[in-house]
Amino acid sequence: MNSDSPADLDWTATDRWLSGEAWTGARIGEHARQLCDTIGPRWSGTDAEWRAIEYIRDQFSLAGLDEVAVEEFDMDCWSWSKADVRSSDGARLDILPFIGCGSFTIEANVVDVGYGTPREIAAVSKQLPGEIALMNIAYEPFTQPMPHAYRLRDVAAAGAAAAAVIDGKSGERREYHSAHDSRDPDFPSPPLPSIAITREAGARLRRTSAARLQVEVATTTESKRTANVHGLLRGDRWPEEDLVLGGHHDTVYASPGGNDNGSGTISTLETARVLAALRRDVGTSPGRTLHFVTYSAEEQGFLGSFDFVRRHYSDGRRPRLAINLDELAAGHMKGLVLGFDHLRALVQRQFDHMGDGLQCHVMSQLDNSSDHFPYLVDGIDAAHLWRWRFRGRHADADYHHEPPDTADKLNVRELKEYAAQLSRLLLRLAQVPPQDWPQLGVPAAEARQRVTTERGAVVRVY
Ligand SMILES: [Zn+2]
């Protein structure tokens, strides 16, 4: 066998079967209705999340996976009960507390810090102490981009007592935001009491001279039980070798999570279903073991994926590759983006063999934006899908951390294509003989060192 034909399979017949099953056997609409409409928002630690966990477990079992487990763990679950703001000009403001923010009450002047760049903070350094900083969350368009978490930390260091952060979207839309850097476990999250306000409210405050705000936010954090859902399809040639495909099943508060991340959850379920059906109906098993997982608490600091890596890969064992699926309704699949570069040629060979024009890229930074990060920080090979960067982003694909991220944001036809391409890719990767696989990740110490030096850098979304 040479490396251009990944296994002694009839790939034309196998691809036809996988694509056909992904297309005609799809259960995408049913999953979207269950997860987004019937269950709805799935903030980790809530009863609704548990209904989703049970649903996904049942679907993995129904698909015929070999072992299906609900892997429980305890987490600190944040919630809020009150978020009131009154403006001195009588305007009512719709606000959201930042995720992880503690309770606070304040009445203070509003001080405009623009985008919170060092120059803008310095310009108001005398007025800022003890007051509420009004800051755009977007990047300042003409300077080196700086994550909003670091700009908020600078605002806090300059003495601001709280921050009102203006959402980038227009039309009274605002998202749940957090402000931390997962590359730095000591980074305060958020660095100061912070609320998100709409672009329209922000503009109005900027027009109001001597604006004052009265803010009252009540939040709590308590220990809750949550779980990842894990199923596998055992390999028939190298069963001790793993490939992982997964995406988070939780949502932020109050969002039904169509795009973020019903799309990734459903693509995980569908890819598992299609590959299990191939084994059942055709008799073709993957060479190495395929693990399918939906992670809990991505929106609360990747707690589920951190638990999964700790539980399964902390004893020196490593998967060959973990692929993360997040926000797939943003655009059709264009390829994979790896954290480390040594698998690039191998993955590209599989893509070339598939013949769909998919591309494999490597990020210049270890991406800390989703559930591939806990793998990368341990030096494990992990990838995220290339979905929208540069081209092909759908116009209505900017919904994630807000109530309108509903089931209709899912593109059913495209998700069928995702399931077909992911199952064809996974099966190829599962058949590559161990001697043709370049290396197993990088040393964990090396990865951790990289993560430390990359703190504060903006990771571009793709
Ligand atoms: Zn997500």
Image: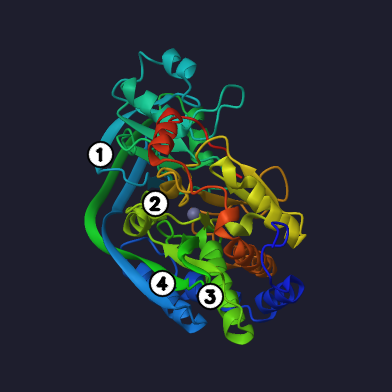
Q: Nearer the viewer, residue 398 or 377?
A: 377
- Residue that numbered label 4 is attached to: 52
- Return the x and y of residue 166 as percentages of the image width and height: 48, 37
Q: CA distance from mark 2 to mark 1?
A: 29 Å
Q: CA distance from mark 4 to mark 3?
A: 10 Å
Q: Which residue type carries mark 1?
A: Thr
Q: Which residue type carries mark 3?
A: His
Name the mark nearer the viewer: 1 or 3.
Answer: 3
Dot 4 and dot 2 residues touching (CB under 8 Å): no
- Is disc 1 surrounded by few (<14), some (14 to 19) or many (20+) residues within 10 Å? some
Q: CA distance from mark 4 to mark 1?
A: 35 Å
Please tell me which residue is depicted at 49% across the width and 43% down the height of the picture: 198
Label 3: which secondary element: helix
- Return the x and y of residue 125 as percentages of the image width and height: 38, 15
Q: CA distance from mark 1 to mark 3?
A: 42 Å
Name the mark nearer the viewer: 2 or 3.
Answer: 2
- Residue that numbered label 1 is attached to: 105
